[in-house]
Structures are given as structure tokens and as C-alpha cells.
Image: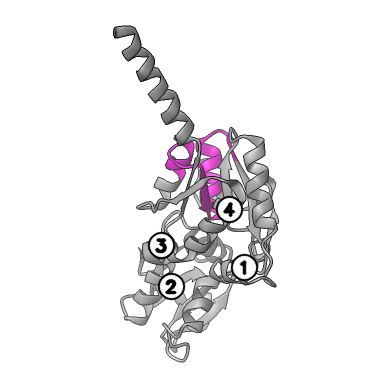
């Protein structure tokens, strides 16, 4: 009986392991409200299930750091990272993560600075004012806006009256429109979406500076993911076509015209900016 019990336990372990491998655990940096991230991912998750033959589960994370730790600690299999969080994950894992695809838009991504104050028309006008970034680990909501401020000879930590971190792009817009801060910096894609959905009035909250372009978001997996699965996922994204109803819905929700392959080398400028801004060890 003891031998049978041991064999049964072994079979259960094998069965559980096999089942676990049939689930693709996906997450995204929480740069918008959790409900919005879930809404955007649902059709994409269903599409990936069909293309990979696996169950796809979306797991929201509490902050940017949790998305990095989840991937490198094998609690997640694929994550939608910003450029800076990808760089952090690459460093934390010692190069054991691989970016698969990005949107065409991510080759030339931008951030915007917004305000309600008529006295603020350029970056230099921010001196002595209050400014909200998004998350501290956000590429488009903190790192690159900070980098462009430094390039304009404005040190956010010493030249501004106060800086704050809202935690997410939509929260930054809310802080500016609500008068909690004089200005804010955020992802241009979220700004355009909120304006398009009439969730912000651009006659009251306006863009006064748009940054030069830089590489940003990507879908990243661990390097130890089976090559066959990496290919299935990559091919699924590359096959998305706005001329089909399914592709149109997914691409619109992802705010993409199409997905293209990407590589780690595309994010070296972001890594350099992070080191220069003191957000990553040199």
C-alpha cells in the first residue's frame, strides 16, 4: 500500500507539473488602472490561447517592481514592460530575459508635459513649480521626462518646488486637472486616449512640451522559455492584422497599428539615460 501511495503521489506531481506548463501567466506594468489593463488584455488573451493552445491567465501586479520580480522568479511567463522596466529586468536577471515584440509606435515613443497654468509654456517655466511624474520605474512617466529635463539644465530634485509620483499615467492627468500639482509628465499614448475618450478637456489641461522620440514598451519573456513557444507567441503578435475584426479590436485596445520584432539592443539608450539620471547603478 505504501508503494502504491508513493506511486500515486508521483503521478499527481507529474500531472500537476504537466498542467502547470499548459498555462501562460501574463502580466503588465500597472501604468493604468487594473480594470483598464484587464479590459485591454481580454481579447488579446483569448487570441493567444487559440494561437498557443495554452490557457492564458492575466495577473495584475501591485507595482512596477512586482512585474520584474514576478518574471525573473518564475511566477510570470510574459510581461508587458516599459523600456526602463525591461532594462531593470535584464539587469536583475543578468541578461536572462528576452524582448519579443513591440508596437510600431514603440520605435518612436514620446512623453508629454501637461499643465493648466497659462504661466507655463516651456520646460524652463517649471522652475519653482510642482510636478507629478507617474511611477518611479516608468520609462515614459518618469525616466525619459527626467532625462529631458536634465538635458534642459533643469534638475527636478533641486530646481522644482516639489515633485510627486502619482503611480500611473491617468493618475498624473487627474493630479494636474485637479490642481494638486502645477504640471505633470506622462505617456503620449495614454494622453491621446484620454482626450479621445473625452476624459480630459484639452482646453483646460494642455500639452506644453512633447519630448523627442525614444524606444519604449515591449512584450518580454524569460530566456529559458522553450524556443517553440517563443516562436508561437511572436508569430501570433506579428500576424495581428487590422483588416480583420479580431485584429482590429486587439490592435485598437493595445493602441497599436501593428506589432514588430524587437531586441535588447534597442534599449541601450534607455539604460544609458537611467544611469545618467542616477536611477540605475553605473
Query: On the image, which quarter does residue 173 sit in?
Result: bottom left
Mark 3 near mark 4, Cβ–Cβ under 8 Å? no
4 or 1: tag closer to the N-terminus: 4
Mark 1 near mark 3, Cβ–Cβ under 8 Å? no
**Residue 145 appears in view:** yes
Which colour scheme appears in the figure? one colour
Asked if residue 279 lies left or right of residue 235, the reply is left
Please name which of the two marks, 2 or 4, marks the residue nearer to the observer: 4
Circle number at residue 256: 1
**Which quadrant is home to the N terminus?**
top left
Of 279 and 110, nearer the camera is 110
Q: Residues within 10 Å of mark 4 (few under 14, many from 20)?
A: few
Magenta span contains residue 88: yes
Taking 246 as reference, is 14 above or below it? above
Magenta span contains residue 268: no
**Which residue is the extreme one toward the bottom?**
203
| Alpha carbon distance from label 2 to label 4 | 40 Å
Asked if residue 256 lies left or right of residue 174, the reply is right
- What stretch of residues is rendered in magenta? 68-97
Q: Residues within 10 Å of mark 1 (few under 14, many from 20)?
A: some
| Alpha carbon distance from label 3 to label 4 | 52 Å
Which residue is labeled 3 in the image? 158
**Residue 252 percent across, percent down from the top left:** 58, 72
**Helix, strand or loop for disc 1:** loop
Which residue is labeled 4 in the image? 50
Circle number at residue 184: 2
**Residue 187 percent across, percent down from the top left:** 52, 68
Amino acid at each position: 500500500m505504501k508503494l502504491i501511495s508513493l506511486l500515486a503521489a508521483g503521478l499527481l506531481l507529474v500531472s500537476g507539473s504537466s498542467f502547470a506548463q499548459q498555462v501562460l501567466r501574463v502580466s503588465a506594468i500597472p501604468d493604468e488602472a487594473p480594470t483598464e489593463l484587464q479590459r485591454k488584455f481580454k481579447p488579446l488573451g483569448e487570441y493567444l490561447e487559440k494561437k498557443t493552445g495554452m490557457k492564458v491567465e492575466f495577473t495584475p501586479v501591485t507595482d512596477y517592481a512586482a512585474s520584474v520580480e514576478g518574471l525573473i522568479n518564475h511566477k510570470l511567463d510574459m510581461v508587458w514592460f516599459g523600456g526602463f522596466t525591461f532594462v531593470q529586468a535584464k539587469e536583475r536577471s543578468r541578461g536572462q530575459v528576452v524582448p519579443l515584440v513591440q508596437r510600431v509606435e514603440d520605435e518612436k515613443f514620446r512623453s508629454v508635459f501637461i499643465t493648466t497654468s497659462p504661466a507655463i509654456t516651456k520646460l524652463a517655466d517649471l522652475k519653482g513649480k510642482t510636478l507629478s511624474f507617474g511611477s518611479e520605474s516608468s520609462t515614459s512617466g518618469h525616466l525619459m521626462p527626467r532625462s529631458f529635463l536634465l538635458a534642459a539644465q533643469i534638475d527636478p530634485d533641486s530646481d522644482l518646488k516639489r515633485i510627486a509620483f502619482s503611480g500611473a499615467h491617468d493618475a498624473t492627468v487627474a493630479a494636474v486637472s485637479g490642481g494638486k500639482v502645477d504640471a505633470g509628465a506622462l505617456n503620449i499614448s495614454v494622453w491621446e486616449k484620454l482626450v479621445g475618450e473625452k476624459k480630459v478637456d484639452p482646453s483646460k489641461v494642455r500639452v506644453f512640451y512633447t519630448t523627442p522620440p525614444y524606444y519604449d514598451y515591449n512584450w518580454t519573456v524569460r530566456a529559458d522559455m522553450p524556443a517553440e513557444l517563443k516562436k508561437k507567441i511572436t508569430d501570433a503578435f506579428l500576424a495581428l492584422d487590422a483588416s480583420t475584426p479580431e485584429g482590429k479590436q486587439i490592435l485598437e485596445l493595445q493602441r497599436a497599428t501593428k506589432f514588430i520584432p524587437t531586441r535588447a539592443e534597442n534599449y541601450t539608450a534607455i539604460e544609458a539615460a537611467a544611469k545618467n539620471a542616477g536611477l540605475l547603478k553605473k
